[in-house]
Amino acid sequence: MSLSPITVFIVESAAIARKTLTDVLSADPTISVIGTASNGVIALEHIPQLQPDVVCTNLQMPEMNGQELIRQLLAVSPRPVLVVSQTVQPTETQTINQVLQAGAVDVLSPPKTEQWSAGERRALLEKIKVLAGVKVLTRPLEPSVPGVSPPPSNQHCSHLQALAIGASTGGPRAIHQILSRLPSDFPLPIFCTQHISAGFLPGLISWQDAMCSLHVKAAVAGEVPVPGTVYFAPDHYHLTLDARGRCYYSTAPAVQRHCPSITVMFDSLAQYYGAGVLGVLLTGMGQDGSAGLQRIAEAGGLTIAQDETSSVVFGMPKVAIDLGAAAQVLPVDHIAPYILEYLS
């Protein structure tokens, strides 16, 4: 017996673009477009009844734009949203930050013409299939995204020397929930690898840097990590440390198609810091990071995996838990308080 197709609802004000997107998706037999709308108001009338697996929306639409649609939708009928819009080019960091804050799971910039290349079609279909397995929680409507005040700083430090965080699908918001709760004088350098489409890392870093007390940046090859700074792995390279503890761009092969790889980063940090690493593996599809978290545990470091309830995709954390690599399994909003208490 064949599996049910992935159902998609499209929200797009331009009739030609709406038809083109429908045709591209419908060409895949595993995907079914079950409805379309020309703006967010109409979409909200139909989506709760149709219950699609994924919603694709543009941002610039009359009556209700895509960003407001996302906020409203997550309050009444939460489901994964893919923003497909020319306004989410990698250089449009402010727009990308806003839609991620609103609750979109992923973004995609379509071709400037209605002609989709084979590669562009493949990228869209892959995103739809990934998002179909994403769990989205209800988010009550708020007038704006609230800031989170960091807890009091901790002046006492344990033997820990570095915090390492890895994430994939759903990771930007999960990482934000951790970083925004850490004080500016956090006593460890923080290393992050986030699986994200090439070109979108600067926007992610800009958002995180603006929304937390820590300094957030892309790691620079050759620099010495310092406490209170977050170092993100760059596009197309694994983030590791050299023999002197400086950031190093590794050109080792991709791990399970991922470069940068969470496991490669975790392995390098465990080798350099030994028991001084606190490793955190967050939401994401697949198993990258699970073997690396196990290596941190074997080196004597502390390990944490995000729990199923708070994970958008309970893939990587589950594999790590099944391996016995996670000493603690915590909801994402408990991770930062746990780290601060451990350090105090």
Image: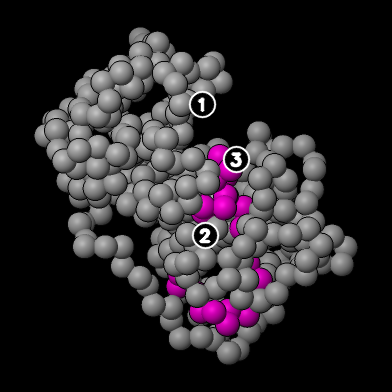
In depth, the one of 327 and 13 nearer the eye is: 13
Q: Is 174 placed above or below 150 here?
A: above
Q: Main secondary structure of the magenta part?
A: loop
* Closer to the eye: label 2 or 1: 2
The answer to whether any part of residue 283 appears in the image is no
Q: Residues within 10 Å of mark 2 (few under 14, many from 20)?
A: some
Question: What residue do we see at 32% from left, 52% from top?
Answer: 102
Q: Secondary structure at mark 3?
A: loop
- Estimate the x, y position of residue 44 in percent, counting from the top left: 16, 37
Q: CA distance from mark 3 to mark 1?
A: 12 Å
User: The residue tagged with tag 1: helix, strand or loop?
Assistant: helix
Image: magenta residue range: 180-204
Crowd class of label 1 (few under 14; some 14 to 19; many from 20; radius 10 Å): few
Amino acid type for the residue under numbered disc 3: Ala
Q: Is residue 298 magenta?
A: no
Residue 182 is one of the magenta-drawn residues: yes
Asked if 275 appears above or below 87 in the picture, the reply is below
Image mark for residue 206:
2
